[in-house]
Image (spheres, rainbow, N blue to C red):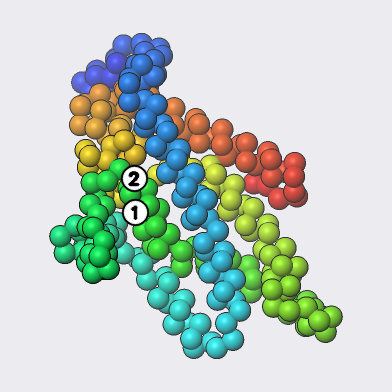
Amino acid sequence: MSFQDFVPKLGYFGSPFVGLKHFEAFFRDPFAFRVIRNTFLLGFYSLLFGFPAPILLALALNELRYPRFKRVVQTISYMPYFLSVVIVVGMVRDLVSATDGPINAAITAMGGKSISFLTSPGWFRTLYISSGIWQGIGFSSIIYLAAMAGINPEMYEAAVIDGAGRMQQIRYITLPSIAPTITILFILAVGGILGNDFQKILLLYNSRVYSTADVVSTYVYRAGIEGSSFSYASAVGLLLNIISLFFLVSANWVSRRVGETSLF
């Protein structure tokens, strides 16, 4: 379909072949650079701030010595993951509402000026990334907690005898022991750096924040699906998948060269 002028009634075998026409049309589009930049930046910032967050939470939970309190904290941190994107976006909108949102209420109470978060391009990435971290940090930490559960306790006992403190145990025992798990998940995260949460962006953004919020997936939805340009949408989506595959293979190659862990 990406290399055709697809006509539904003609099907895949009857639609005319046009080669790279749709790919060329995308790069000639004045908004192409903007959506590619926004897609990459949202993915990069999500990786930069979102990837270490569950690791830090797992390390903190692993250090808790009160099982009941630990279970309560784990349960609370897992709960947001099971909320639908619609509910999460609704909560974000209520929190940052310019009229009656508690965040703006606190700002004005301290003498500040109310901020229109939802219509300010500069705030969109912060809202998107912070809500994503809040929703996924607890569930993502499960993998790291499972890896920590497999560490031999005798290693910690030997470290205590040698005089190692809590931070030294984390640095020299816990982190090296879960390093293979971190590496595999990091490679997968790099491969999905362009796979932004389409549903959340579509529900959260508006025309005023297109300069920072419009990504490839939302652009494809507007230009391709709503405009019935199925071949054009397919071509842009294929291009995005090729770039993601390149990132995945590159991250795996670097990991294999630098360390001993890789996907393939």
Q: Position of residue 88 (x, y in %)?
A: 29, 60
Q: Is residue 141 visible?
A: yes
Assign a secondary structure to mark 2. helix
Give the label, 1 or 2, closer to the camera. 2
**Could you say which is closer to the camera, residue 7 or residue 190?**
190
For the point 75% across and 50% down, the residue is 260
Disc on the earlier residue, 1 or 2? 2
Q: Position of residue 127 (x, y in %)?
A: 34, 54
Residue placed under numbered mark 1 in the picture: 127
- Mark 1: which amino acid? Leu
Bin the neighbour count of mark 1 within 10 Å (Cα to Cα): few under 14, some 14-19, many 20 and up. Answer: some
Q: Position of residue 156 (x, y in %)?
A: 75, 79
Locate residue 100: give its quadrant.
bottom left
Q: Is residue 1 visible?
A: no
- Mark 2: which amino acid? Gly
Residue 136's place in the image compared with 125, above or below, is below
Residue 90's place in the image compared with 212, above or below, is below
For the point 55% across and 44% down, the residue is 190
Assign a secondary structure to mark 1. helix
Bin the neighbour count of mark 2 within 10 Å (Cα to Cα): few under 14, some 14-19, many 20 and up. Answer: some
In the image, farthest residue toward the right: 162
Dot label at residue 122: 2
